[in-house]
Image (cartoon, rainbow, N blue to C red):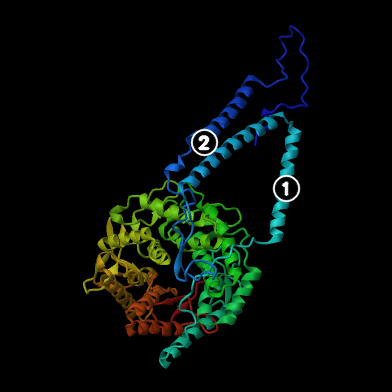
Amino acid sequence: MTTPALLPLSGRRIPALSPGASSFPHHRATLRLSEKFILLLILSAFITLCFGAFFFLPDNSKHKRFDLGLEDVLIPHIDAPKQGKHVAGQVVIHGQGGHDEHRHREEEESLRDKIRADHERALQEAKEKLRKSRAELQAEIQTEKVRVVEELKKNKEAGPRPLPPVPMPKVVGVNDGEPPEPAVKEKRDKIREMMKHAWDSYRQYGWGHNELKPLAKKGHTTNIFGNSQMGATIVDALDSLYIMGLHEEFKDGQEWIEQNLDFTGNAEVSVFEVNIRFIGGLLAAYYLSGQEVFKLKAVQLAEKLLPAFNTPTGIPWAMVNLKSGVGRNWGWASAGSSILAEFGTLHMEFVHLTYLTGNPVYYQKVMHIRKLLAKMDRPNGLYPNYLNPRTGRWGQHHTSVGGLGDSFYEYLLKAWLMSDKTDAEARKTYDDAIEAIERHLIRKSNSGLTFIGEWKNGHLERKMGHLTCFAGGMFALGADGSPDDKAGHYLQLGAEIAHTCHESYDRTVLKLGPEAFKFDSGLEAVAVRQNEKYYILRPEVIETYWYMWRFTHDPKYRQWGWEAAQVSREVRVRGTPMGSRAQMGAPCSVRGLD
């Protein structure tokens, strides 16, 4: 807005000067020379900017495309409407059509005409503003404020805008009936009972809270989801409830979301956690059930996360305030860096958001991250866990396939799979990363256990975290499509990691795996420090068992998973979900988070 002090004020009265009255200060009825110069400078800069934009815009006739660049947004397995031309299972590619050179030239000329018109209009508006008094300008500002307030009020009363209809992806593997083996059915029913026990206890003691304290039997709200009751457990559990056939419980969760889930509060949340648990949970519930409320809530929340990307590099902040849009990073993360596993675990949800809404901004945000990483040098081909969002430089050279790094690699592979194996860029990035991980991080212990260590400032730490155990399943999942016919190699590598992680469970008293375990000084697959000897319901080992069972059908993986489920069932607190921290040193010793 133009500064009022630089404008002529019609109400100003200038006393007349008598000739020869040199002792009085010089008053004037016009602008000072310096003020005229400043005003002229502003107008000159504005005109230069407009003409510069006109003459120096790139010549788009030299480019093949003149669109939003969404040719890589790929959502496979679409059942198209009958009148459509797409075949079920075919990939729909957004942004493609009959683009020819003639249309490019027309669009380019249209853009130039628009720039000319905008330039002329801006000059005219500037002249009109200069003729108005301060009172007139203030009246215009007040009128605009009232208009904006009224518009916001109408939008709020009208509710969320409807989203465009899109074909639903075909969901495979849901409601496939009962297993033929009685023993398998009995075990599955007990797993479902464990889920219902946990849900019912949360329903009774912590409904609407983000979590439940099992010993205190009361709700709990953690800082990663802000200081408000956002029902994180409800949203995160919806897909499991649906797949397990617990449809009444699913309906209860849906009703709570419809009536209570709100993102307008003054809450600072983790972008990563909210994305994978809320947006991911809501999208999964939508694709499973087809209920529009889940899609609408996911989009509302995603819009609140977008300000986190307002950094000099486009690498998002770790935290964002849902009300103000102000972002920041964790103070402990290598001088305020963003974390690889956090900003690298947005791709799948954001691509689906663009698919469901038609808004390219979500896709563009995550593709910008990928392209920025592709341009950066990587020490030994490894991705460090920290990246400064202000400078675009790596932080501490610490690489881990476990905490701080894990899901970045997982999302690269799954982006390729989600694209029906057409996102070659994602696949190559994954393959290059895994090759460097094999070269520098994967080793065998003295007794032959394969483990994945951590790279810290040029040295390998022979420690493996429970979080790292997901990699066994990832290697198996990525075996098909591996370069140089290495599918068998990666399936075997997945089996070796699964065996090592099972050993970390089997070598404890409780038969539940520790938070971290070492391969040093004669100790293998065991926790050394007291602060590593606990189990906090992490799923990574069971996830790897599941993948290995799916790919090999070796019954030992089902048996290993069942053994862990039995122990978890035994140590749960009566009347509440199972305890959150199970000590490794004493049988059935459980202590809660509080």
Asked where in the image residue 14 lies, by quadrant, the reply is top right
| Residue 446 relative to residue 51: left or right | left
The three-letter code of the residue at mark 2 reads Ala
Q: Is residue 529 something that shows in the picture? A: no
Reading the image, the residue beneath label 2 is: 53
Position of 98 with respect to 400 (left or right) is: right
Q: Residue at x 48, y 61 (%)?
A: 351
For residue 592, side relative to residue 256 (left or right): left
Q: Taking 344 as reference, is 135 above or below it?
A: above
Across and down, in percent, residue 313 comes to: 45, 48
The image position of residue 72, as x and y in percent, is 44, 58
Assign the N terminus to one quadrant of the image: top right
Decide: is 211 above or below 143. below
- Contact between marks 2 and 1 (CB within 8 A): the answer is no
Q: Which residue is mark 1?
A: 147
Residue that extends furthest to the top in the rendered view of this protein: 20
Q: Secondary structure at mark 2?
A: helix
Query: What x and y, as percent, mark residue 167?
Result: 53, 68
Rendered image quadrant of residue 120: top right
* Mark 2: few/some/many CA within 10 Å (<14, 14-19, 20+): few
Comparing 551 with 191, the one in front is 551
Tell which circle, 2 or 1, labels the residue nearer the N-terminal end.
Answer: 2
The answer to whether residue 526 is visible is yes
Query: Whole-percent x and y of residue 161?
Result: 64, 60
Q: Amino acid at mark 1?
A: Arg
Q: Residue at x 58, y 65 (%)?
A: 165
Q: Residue 403 falls in which quadrant of the image?
A: bottom left
Distance (Cα) linking label 2 and label 1: 31 Å
Which residue lies most toward the bottom here? 182
Q: Secondary structure at mark 1?
A: helix
